[in-house]
Image: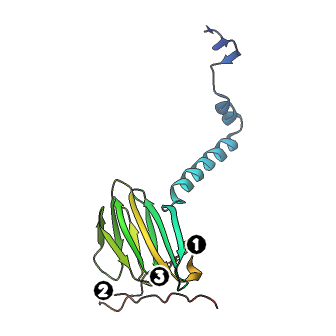
Amino acid sequence: MKRNKKTRSVNTNAGTHHLGRSAARKLALTKPWLARLGCLGLAVGLFWSQSARAFSFVALGEGTLPSGQIVSMFQVTFDPGESFPWHFHTGPLWGVIVSGTLTEDEGCATALNVYAAGSAFSETPGRVHRVFNYGTVPVVINFTAIVPSCYGNYNNTILVDGPRCEGNSGKSHLEKVPPCAP
């Protein structure tokens, strides 16, 4: 490989490569609207990659009980800073924190619930809450849920605007789980 200082190029077996301005920079200087469009596309892509994912989900298996209800087992991971908005579940649910620390907000001026690795919790159908990972490591949770047959296929969460509080009692109303269509 020979370097030519006068023309700012490099001769290799593959040909001559100019060391001056990059092709992208040349294009940006001759077509500034294209550079702005590229920057906008990059910004949108970066924003989407950060905001589109609220958590990761791994299906572990589902089975049908003799009653027709579905037992769902799945794992959810929240990276640091991630959260899941106000919601409730369509059947009872149990969770085991495998790693990290999960923070739960039930609203209505109640204290936050904090679940560290190794702890377990249960959720009542219709109880509105939201969860956060305020920590520095991922929160990994293994879940088991029992839901009506129409809520199978891991469809056990209903998003809502927030809890309906009972005055200043610190309690919220349970949301009615929509029944399965006949």
Residue, disc 1: 153
Q: Quadrant of the N terminus?
A: top right
Please tell me which residue is depicted at 59% across the width and 53% down the height of the picture: 44
**Which badge, 3 or 2, is on the more N-terminal residue?**
3
Q: Amino acid at mark 1?
A: Asn
- The local secondary structure at tag 2 comes to loop
Q: Amino acid at mark 2?
A: Gly
- Nearer the observer: mark 1 or 2; the answer is 1
Q: CA distance from mark 3 to mark 2?
A: 23 Å
Q: CA distance from mark 3 to mark 1?
A: 13 Å
| Observer-nearest of 1 and 38 | 1
Please tell me which residue is depicted at 44% across the width and 85% down the height of the picture: 126
Query: Which disc is residue 91 wearing?
Result: 3
- The local secondary structure at tag 1 comes to loop
Q: Quadrant of the C terminus?
A: bottom right
Position of residue 2 measured from the top left corner of the image (x, y, whole percent): 62, 7
Q: Residue furthest front?
A: 66
- The local secondary structure at tag 3 comes to loop
Colour scheme in the image? rainbow
Q: Amino acid at mark 3?
A: Gly
Residue, disc 2: 170
* 86 sits left or right of 179 in the view: left
